[in-house]
Amino acid sequence: MARSININLRCSTDTRRFGDTCHLQFQSPNPRSPLLLKLFRSSISRHPKKGDKSQTLSLRTRRPSFVTVMSHMATEEEQIADDRMLVFVPPHPLIKHWVSVLRNEQTPCPIFKNAMAELGRLLMYEASRDWLPTVTGEIQSPMGVASVEFVDPREPVAVVPILRAGLALVEHAASILPATKTFHLGISRDEETLQPTIYLNKLPEKFPDGSRVFVVDPMLATGGTIVAAINLLKECGVENKQIKVISAVAAPPALKKLSEKFPGLHVYTGVVDPTVNDKGFIVPGLGDAGDRSFGT
């Protein structure tokens, strides 16, 4: 049976510019399937043809907005049009659990850091589905010959944590990905202007053709930091479709910037929150991810 979900999103950093409230009604025959958010600039109403069991989508806003919520299984992402920026919010109970631990202001630093690492592991697991290069062959098991499939170690996944909070979210990457290379990016944000400053860049001059890159940034708030990071990757020869962004919490202003600048990009996040305040923090969010992860 289909289930209706009403969601209120305030797409705002500045209520003078982004004061719209988006009222979305979502119906899906499979209410537990992952959410994909496609960002765009006009409202849309789509209904299935007679006999079609696909989901029904309706969107009404006071002015055209840029968020649509659809339901797809994560394994279907290759069937989506290449020019869409997609945001995956996996509905796994453990992802919801660790997001809840991170939100709690009473969570102590060591537990917060561990929760961030566990959330990162789960999100990277979801993001690597149908994305990793593999090799096939045969091996001898104790009971006979078996056909097998391995992740190809000759094509390691590049992991790019944005310091310093990204270090916590990426801590368990090696336990998920059999072959990885880590390239650190240090980007700080001016507290007054909210503009990013790059203070460390360990990216190679050029990534090998066909590289797969995880960019790990716990908080996608105003979008300045993640946009700066992806611009650096593109200078190294990486295309949008070769990049997947991993974040703990995302907000509409950052997602809007990413959708405008990087069509075809895929973002995996634990939750999408409705607003960003005038200091550039996601609300309700989880506070300063770096401070809470490292206690400084």
Image (cartoon, grey):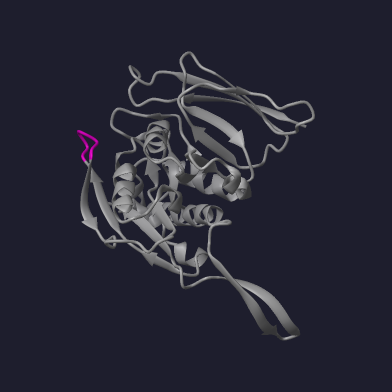
- Tell me, yes or no, if residue 186 can be seen here: yes
- Look at the image and say whether residue 13 sits in the magenta stretch: no
Q: Is residue 125 above or below residue 260?
A: below
Q: Residue 274 appears at what percent x and percent y?
A: 45, 29
Name the residue nearer the viewer: 281 or 105: 281
Please give left or right for residue 275 compared with residue 81 in the image.
left
Q: Quadrant of residue 288?
A: top left
* Residue at horizontal 57 percent and vertical 23 percent from the top: 24
Quadrant (top left, top right, bottom left, bottom right) of the N terminus: top right
Q: Is residue 147 above or below residue 245?
A: below
* Residue at horizontal 72 percent and vertical 83 percent from the top: 145
Q: Quadrant of residue 186?
A: bottom left
* Residue at horizontal 58 percent and vertical 46 percent from the top: 77
- Look at the image and say whether residue 191 sits in the magenta stretch: yes
* Residue at horizontal 66 percent and vertical 74 percent from the top: 148
Q: Residue 252 appears at what percent x and percent y?
A: 42, 32
Majority secondary structure in the magenta region: loop
Q: Residue furthest right?
A: 51
Please give left or right for residue 164 compared with residue 43 in the image.
left
Name the residue nearer the viewer: 190 or 233: 233
Total count of labels: 0
Q: Residue furthest top?
A: 62
- Tell me, yes or no, if residue 291 can be seen here: no
The magenta segment: 190-195
Q: Residue 256 appears at what percent x and percent y?
A: 40, 32
Q: Residue 108 appears at what percent x and percent y?
A: 40, 51
